[in-house]
Amino acid sequence: MEALAALADPTRRQIVALLAAGEQGAGELAGQFPVSRPAISRHLRVLREAGLVKVRAEGQRRVYALDPRPLSELDAWLAPYRRLWAQRLGALDTEIARGRRARTQEDGR
Amino acid sequence: MEALAALADPTRRQIVALLAAGEQGAGELAGQFPVSRPAISRHLRVLREAGLVKVRAEGQRRVYALDPRPLSELDAWLAPYRRLWAQRLGALDTEIARGRRARTQEDGR
DNA sequence: GAGATGTGTAACAGACAGCTTACGTAAACG
DNA sequence: CGTTTACGTAAGCTGTCTGTTACACATCTC
């Protein structure tokens, strides 16, 4: 779950969101943020080390692309907790209180 | 997404995992970690401010319980990205490659 | 009430994250 | 080749985290 630490920063989440729409060069990416280019370069490094992005050298440019695998891991980490809010939203917690224990039935849609 | 910052810490994730199994008192909780009790108290404060846990006073004890709502928000934040790894796993990326000239085709395995 | 018990908070030290400016380097360009 | 272009990295500053010890405060117990 190293991805969680990387995604804790709002700038990095925004970078991830941008890259979800398509790959971009480092400078191109930095131009969309109010901070300096080296700052973005460092953010990209963190994202790279977390496995969330991968780089491709294209001439002198560095093209960054999103790698969704750590997000998938996050999804897997989150999975066991899903039943917790699934219970709260439905009226089935009445059923649970009725004597049923660990009736999972999450993700009905 | 303040929850992401709170969950970035491994100790806090462990607390969340413990509370998912059932509510616990602060000291009872602290006893299961190698750090001092005030340290856990601080972690609990962060989790509380992130809305991930709620406290109930029971005599002089403070009983903590998990509040899954921020986790649900995280789930919602993650949702738009799901298609990204769904594509990689499924065979539908063939359909995408069928008309698009974006011949990326990396990661053959 | 006096003392024990269960917790949160304050103060402080050390580690770390994020930003900026300055610099190094490799590819493209003339 | 020298210069421009596109990046990454190093150094330094500052603010924020995390952990520890010391302390303040309620709440039971007797």
Image (spheres, coloured by chain):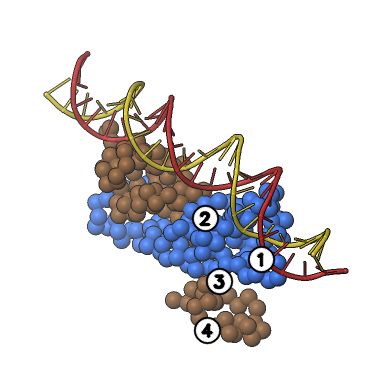
Chain colours: A brown, B blue, C yellow, D red
Left or right, A70 with respect to A41, comes to right
Q: Residues within 10 Å of mark 2 (few under 14, many from 20)?
A: many
Q: Between label 1 and label 2, give the one nearer the viewer.
A: 1
Does the CB distance between marks 3 and 1 fall below 8 Å?
A: no
Tag 2: amino acid:
Ala
Between disc 2 and disc 4, the foreground one is 2
Vertical arrangement, residue A64 with respect to residue A106, above or below: above
Which comes before the other along the chain, label 4 or label 3?
A: 3
Pointer 1 residue: B62
Q: Amino acid at mark 3?
A: Leu
Q: Secondary structure at mark 3?
A: helix
Question: Circles 1 and 2: CB distance less than 8 Å?
Answer: no
Callout 4 and callout 3 share a chain: yes
State how far apart marks 3 and 1 are (Cα): 22 Å
Q: What separation in Å lies between label 2 and label 3 (alpha carbons)?
A: 19 Å
Q: Amino acid at mark 1?
A: Arg
Chain of the residue displaying label 1: B
Q: Is residue B53 left or right of residue B85?
A: right
Q: Which residue does the numbered mark 4 point to in the structure image?
A: A91
Where does label 3 land, which residue? A84
Q: Nearer the viewer, residue B73 or B47?
A: B47
Residue B13, image quadrant: bottom right
Q: Residue at x 51, y 64 (%)?
A: B51
Q: Residue at x 49, y 73 (%)?
A: A107
Image quarter (top left, top right, bottom left or bottom right) of the C terminus of chain A? bottom left
Marks 3, 1: nearer the viewer: 1
Disc ID at residue B6 = 2
Residue A76 in the image: x percent, y percent? 52, 60
Residue C21 picture quarter:
top left
How far is the residue under mark 2 from the one under mark 4? Answer: 30 Å
